[in-house]
Amino acid sequence: VIGSEGTLGIITKLAIACPPMPKSENVAFLACSSFEQVLKLFKEAKANLGEILSAYEFLDAECVSVLTKWTGVTSPLEGESPFYVLIETAGSDATHDEEKLHRFLEHTMETGLVEDGTVASEPSKIKAIWEVRERITEALRHDGYVYKYDISLPLPKIYDVVEDTRKRFEGSDGVTRVVGFGHMGDGNLHLNITGPSYDKKVMDSLEPWLWEWTRDVRGSISAEHGIGFKKRDVIGFSKTPEAVALMATLKKTMDPKGILNPYKMVQVPGMP
């Protein structure tokens, strides 16, 4: 039932576990010269921060550009860089966590993985840094019509699709900018393309090309936002015909009248 987006059952009882708030939180905002550096930094973060690493987000320079243009929010770093990384740590010992984070930052700066960076432990400063990541979507809405995609890709390929999309629309009047940001931990990329207004030519150039691109690198057409009804008819780019048929069989067996969240996830013969 988990992962079926409500198409196989309904929740009748729920227990919520409420873990205690971490006693220590730190956020670092770092600049990297290439996406290769972003990947290497992620590997170092997992190895050296271990149990206190609670978030690793990346965003490109175009994200900061559109953010500054439409919201006034700027990078906390003085210089510009092709890529930025937001790292959050959470633990129970403030002294231990800060020392661990600072050792990690010293090492990555000495080895050239990080060009510049800043660290915050005060709630107000932590919030200000998180705004750089969290208000990107708001800024994009002001930039025009947004073609939004939420896909999951192997980490070495995660930014290739952003670059290929830019090449695909180079010189196009229908596209203003292409940005990429996401969660490295699960290979989740938010690919956003903005334009002056909705353009069918742009959409036809994006789909099914993007689904095919994702399939060819063994990615998933949907990550944290699910399948729903918008991606129901393209699920075959991520799942084999046999897997889709099995999903349809399970749906028909557990919900023969098709009343549980209809129209979503998978098309079942004889059902809406």
Image (tube, grey):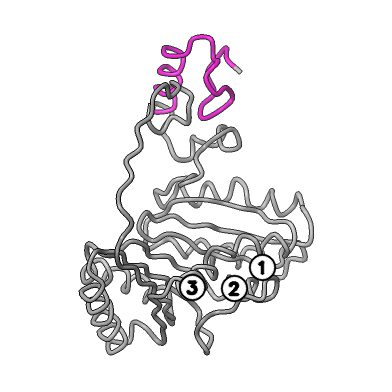
The mark found on residue 177 in the picture is 1
For the residue carrying disc 1, how many other residues have a C-alpha within 10 Å: few (<14), some (14-19), or many (20+)?
many
Q: Earlier in the sequence, mark 1 or mark 3?
A: 3
What residue is shown with label 3? Answer: 124
Residue 264 locus on image (x, y percent):
55, 28
Q: Secondary structure at mark 1?
A: strand
Image marks 2 and 1: residues in contact by CB distance under 8 Å: yes
Which image quarter: residue 169? bottom right
Q: Residues within 10 Å of mark 3 (few under 14, many from 20)?
A: few
Give residue 23's quadrant in the image: bottom left
> Could you tell me how far apart the alpha carbons at marks 2 and 3 are, in whole angstroms?
25 Å
Task: Please report whichever mark, 2 or 3, sits nearer to the chain's N-terminal start.
Answer: 2
Q: Residues within 10 Å of mark 2 (few under 14, many from 20)?
A: some
CA–CA distance in space, label 1 to label 3: 31 Å
Q: Percent position (x, y) of residue 3?
A: 41, 33
The kind of secondary structure element at disc 2 is: helix
Q: Which residue was labeled with disc 2?
A: 62
Instruction: Specify the amino acid type for callout 2.
Output: Glu
Q: Which residues are magenta?
A: 243-271
Q: Identify the residue at the far top of this view.
A: 256
Tags 1 and 3 touching, CB below 8 Å: no
Left or right: 186 as drawn, with respect to 97: right
Q: Give the amino acid at mark 3.
A: Ser
207 lies left or right of 190: right
| Disc sitting over residue 152 in the figure | none
Determine whether, in the image, residue 51 is placed left or right of residue 202: left
Does the magenta portion include 81? no
Residue 59 x, y percent position in the rendering: 50, 69
Q: Residue at x 52, y 73 (%)?
A: 128
